[in-house]
Amino acid sequence: MEMYLLGVIDDIMLWAQLLWWLWLAILAYFYYAWARDHLFFMPPLVLVVAGILIYYLVIEHWIFGTLGLIFYTLIFGGVLYLLPIFLPFFRKRPGS
Amino acid sequence: MGPILFALLPLLDIFQTIGDLDLVIKIMAMSYMILWLYAQLRESMLLFGLGTMLAGYFLFINPLPTIIIVIIFVAFVSLGMHLQMLFQFGLFPLLRFFGIELEHPEVAEQQKMQSIEQKVRRGEDLTREEEEFMERVQKRETKYQQRMGQMMQRYGH
């Protein structure tokens, strides 16, 4: 087997790494934005709270941080309003 | 086996995780309380500071009830409108599809009436139940209109 073909794995790992860092950055921005939205009247406190949230929910326990983001987006993003539009696909046609 | 696994739990750092998340939840609850206090008391910073100290005191002394109250407050007061829309436009249509009616009966009645009218417009046959339903609603509506007409005659100009 030509060994140079294994370079594909390196490429995949590199892209996985890059996407992983991108996801962590998105997560960190999400929690920073949360702190900014809730404590906009105290800029130093925004930094402190955002720092604590990012340390615990992005660096230490990224699983819970990701779950939090998904839950928050699901509930408050308006995705659930769209669920009933899929109902006609499951409804019985009048003819059949 | 169970007790051994339970004894090994600290090795999984699960208590550490719970402690960390506990701190995070407390900080988020405190943020919500400070935001609410600022919205109420931004005219007088003295009261705002005292309120913040009081909120912190409550959170320190009995964290669980305070967090529960904050969650209830946020869910039903701050996000009540959103919750209502989520129920009305997300949950109820889904449940109605599965045959569960949780809405106000008048809303469901109106929707049923609309679907029957559509059927009539398409020229389809109605079932006996649908015909009876339509008759009942129409009878009630004519009665209502008659009563309104009487009221207008009596009290209107």
Image (cartoon, rainbow, N blue to C red):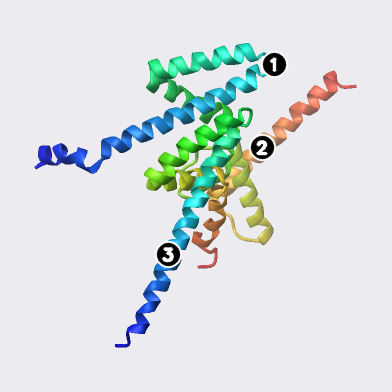
Q: Are marks 2 and 1 in contact (CB under 8 Å)?
A: no
The CA distance from mark 3 to mark 2 is: 68 Å
Give residue A16's mark. 3
Q: Residues within 10 Å of mark 1 (few under 14, many from 20)?
A: few
Q: Residues within 10 Å of mark 2 (few under 14, many from 20)?
A: few
The answer as to whether the residues below labels 2 and 1 share one chain is: yes
Q: Earlier in the sequence, mark 2 or mark 1?
A: 1
Q: Position of residue A25 (x, y in %)?
A: 51, 51
Q: Name the amino acid type tagged 2.
A: Lys
Q: Name the amino acid type tagged 3.
A: Ala
- Chain letter for mark 2: B
Residue at point 63%, 42% (across, down): B110
Residue nearer the viewer, B118 or B69: B69
Give residue B139's mark. 2
Residue nearer the viewer, B139 or B74: B74
* Relative to A56, B101 lies left or right: right
Q: Is residue B41 above or below residue B148?
A: above
**Number of numbered callouts drawn:** 3
The answer as to whether the residues below labels 3 and 2 share one chain is: no
The CA distance from mark 3 to mark 1 is: 51 Å
Q: Position of residue B16 (x, y in %)?
A: 29, 36
* Relative to B41, B87 lies left or right: left
Give residue A50's mark. none
Name the secondary structure under disc 2.
Answer: helix
Residue at point 54%, 41% (across, down): A32
Q: Name the amino acid type tagged 1.
A: Glu
- Chain letter for mark 3: A
Q: Is residue A58 above or below residue B78?
A: below
The answer as to whether the residues below labels 3 and 1 share one chain is: no
